[in-house]
Image (cartoon, rainbow, N blue to C red):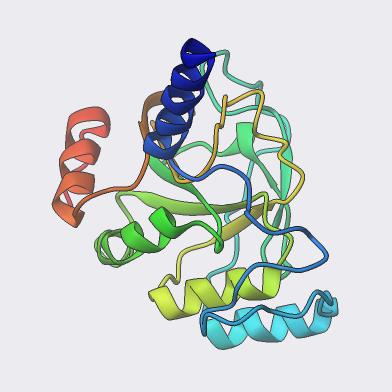
Amino acid sequence: MRLRRSSGLVLGLLLLLAGCGQPAVTRGAGPASSTGLAAPATTPATGELSAAKKKAAIEDCPASDPSVPAHQQGLPDLVLQCLGGGRPVRLAGLRGRPMMINIWAQWCPPCRQEAPFISEVAQQKQDRLLVLGVDYADPRPELAIEFAQLSGWRFPQLVDQDHALKDPLKIIGPPQTLFVDAQGVVVYRHSGPFSSAEQIRELAQTHLGVTL
């Protein structure tokens, strides 16, 4: 019995170190809003989400090649929708520029912890590095847009509400960040939150050769 309890504690610690697990609330209750109060469970209409996205000044999602072959060591050949509306994106078709893809959720405390560092980096020389977010396993897109707005995130955001990336990218939980080269190859994965903007810059330089 003692061995089983110890194993359970170790597993729990590993999941915490890797990032967030699944949201601690059900879809019916909804996660807490930025005010700390329980948010209503209703889903806003598409027009409302589009208006919220526009108000938050979140950029449109990038164009992706519909026909380029998927890279064996690259992003999965999946199409994700754009948060708040816009053109969908074929992940395997994102080519031509190094990328940093941050997988996050508004219900994830470590994601909130690293948000200012990502915001700082995303505002610098985006012509050299495409910063892209993926709102993961999140039943509340309106709170995700609110999260992005409060964090000062203007870079494009995709949606993976149904955990499509879980198996192909082995996602335990957010935050996870992928560094992808211009040929679409995933060259490095960072698990857990970043501790500073400088850490992100160092990883971009080391793994992508991008100076920010």
- In this rendering, is residue 95 above or below 80? above
What residue is drawn where x is 59% and y is 67%?
60
Pick the quarter of the image with the N terminus.
Answer: top right
The reply to whether residue 111 is in sight is: yes
Residue that sits furthest to the front in the current view: 1
Q: Residue at x 51, y 23 (%)?
A: 8
Q: How many marks?
A: 0
Front position in the image: 178 or 173: 173
Q: Give the residue drawn at x 52%, y 85%.
A: 35
Residue 11: where, in percent of width, then height? 48, 24
Report the side of 67 relative to 143 (left or right). Answer: right
Q: Nearer the viewer, residue 188 or 10?
A: 10
The image quarter in which residue 125 lies:
bottom left
- Across and down, in percent, residue 103 comes to 51, 46
Q: Position of residue 96 (x, y in %)?
A: 45, 38
Q: Residue at x 53, y 15 (%)?
A: 4
Relative to residue 26, is residue 18 depicted above or below? above
Q: Is 49 placed left or right of 131 in the picture?
A: right
Query: 136 or 124: which is nearer to us?
Result: 136
Place of residue 155 in the rendered image (x, y in percent of width and height, measured from the top left):
46, 64
Residue 210 sits in which quadrant?
A: top left
Q: Is residue 79 above or below residue 53?
A: above
Answer whether residue 126 is visible to the viewer in this image: no
Is 22 positioned to the left or the right of 30 in the image?
left
